[in-house]
Image: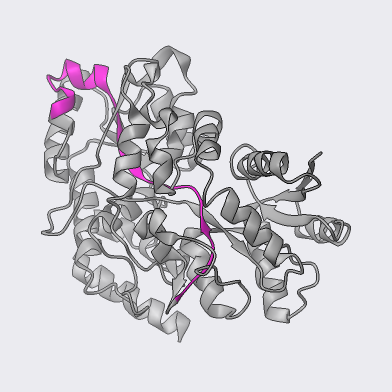
Amino acid sequence: MLKSRIITSSSLLSLLLVSATTFADELKVWAWDPNFNVAAMKEAADLYSTKNPGFAIDVIDSGKEDIEKKLHTMLASGITSALPDIVLIEDYNAQKYLQAYPGSFEPLQASIDYSKFAPYKVQVMTVEDKVYGIPFDSGVAGMFYRADYLSKAGFSHEDMVDITWDEFIEIGQKVKEETGIHMLTFDINDVVLPHIMMQSGGEWFVTEQGDINIANNRALKETLETIRKLNDAKIVRPTSGWSSFVGSFNAGRVATVPSGVWIMGSIKSVDTQAGQWRVAPIPKLNLENATHASNQGGSSWYVLSTSKNKDKAIEFLAETFAKDINLYQELLQDRGVVATYLPAAQGTSYNMEDPFFGGQPVFQDFAKWVNEIPQVQYGMYTQEIDNAIAAEIPALLEGESVEKILQRVETNIKYQIM
């Protein structure tokens, strides 16, 4: 029988106390979100235990910020006895841990066939010639839209496919004129839209070598120019925070939601809107190498080198998240997890038509787009640069030069990290 316990913790102190009491013969796992990541790990353990009697796992559920603080504190201090065997790390932060604490995570390229995962996801966990971690969920992006609003303005699904952001703005102006509905939300502190746009242009805040890439970043420059265009066109509905964001589309106040696939659960939470939604590829930036595919969010599993059970941990992850297609079918149906394990896309769950989206096989589209996401190096300072850019958005919307803004951000960031 599988012994699996979920321990909730709202503070760093209680998480430490729980860790100290975990049985030594169990695999310890740190993760957040009981309905998504934690639940996925438990499902994987349940399946694995059917072929491996006696297998036991202890999943400690805590907030992402608590886990990050504790992981940093223990790795920096060298006091590693209470570290887990497996930890979930957000993709944007992976390089920060891998580079700041070399030798703390187990390289897995000898045990895992990374050619079976989305290339952009493998890039996240690669340092020089070593690959760490098991890629998990994708934040593959799509443009969710209200087909009823678009139809009232004279647009079909074909009109929403293979468009640029400039064309999106033109459609948005027509939609607002005909329906009075804003095209999308906009929160000056939210990173979702800027991240989606920039990665679709094939660049990030750092180069592949890890050097700061802000002032001369063409994709970032075009992203900020596009955000200003969206604002100037008066087709955005101002929001502030998660509740305001979700409330806007749940209440039918916006026509589109460009976002990672993880937003689907929130969209589908309003039963009365069933059949009114569709999904199209994201619009493309006005850049030569820009694509209609991008990512926002996502996380992966890592094995700690200090683990006394690391061989067992690697074998478990290799047999589940790096191999088991049936697991990913269940996770897609039960949790909405879009896999970055490419063979999973051939499963029947990915071809199912979704009545909420008018019978569209939406996961089939997302599975295709996963493999088209541009590879970028997220580097170590995504959060710091996000904060610096967010502080400049008011100046952007007031008309200040994008070039001056980006130069100012780069100067400030280099000052912070030197």
- What residue is shown at x 46% (from left), y 68% (from top)? 384
Q: Position of residue 289 (x, y in %)?
A: 15, 59
Q: Which residues are magenta?
A: 130-158
- Residue 146 belongs to magenta span: yes
On screen, residue 328 versus residue 188, left or right, reads right
Provide residue 166's location: percent of width, then percent of height: 12, 44
Q: Position of residue 393 (x, y in %)?
A: 32, 57
Between residue 374 and residue 193, name the one nearer to us: 374
Residue drawn 18% across the image and 48% down it: 284
The answer to which quarter of the image holds residue 36 is: top right
User: Could you tell whether 393 is left or right of 247 in the image?
Assistant: left
Residue 216 painted magenta: no
Q: Is residue 54 above or below residue 14?
A: above
Q: For this view, does 164 lie left or right of residue 366?
A: left
Q: Quadrant of residue 174?
A: top left
Dividing the image into 4 quarters, which one contains the N terminus?
A: top right
Up-down relation of residue 138 to residue 352 (above or below)? below
Q: Which residue is at a point 10% across and 59% down the rendered structure image?
A: 288
* Residue placed furthest toward the bottom: 418
- Mark yes or no: residue 237 visible: no
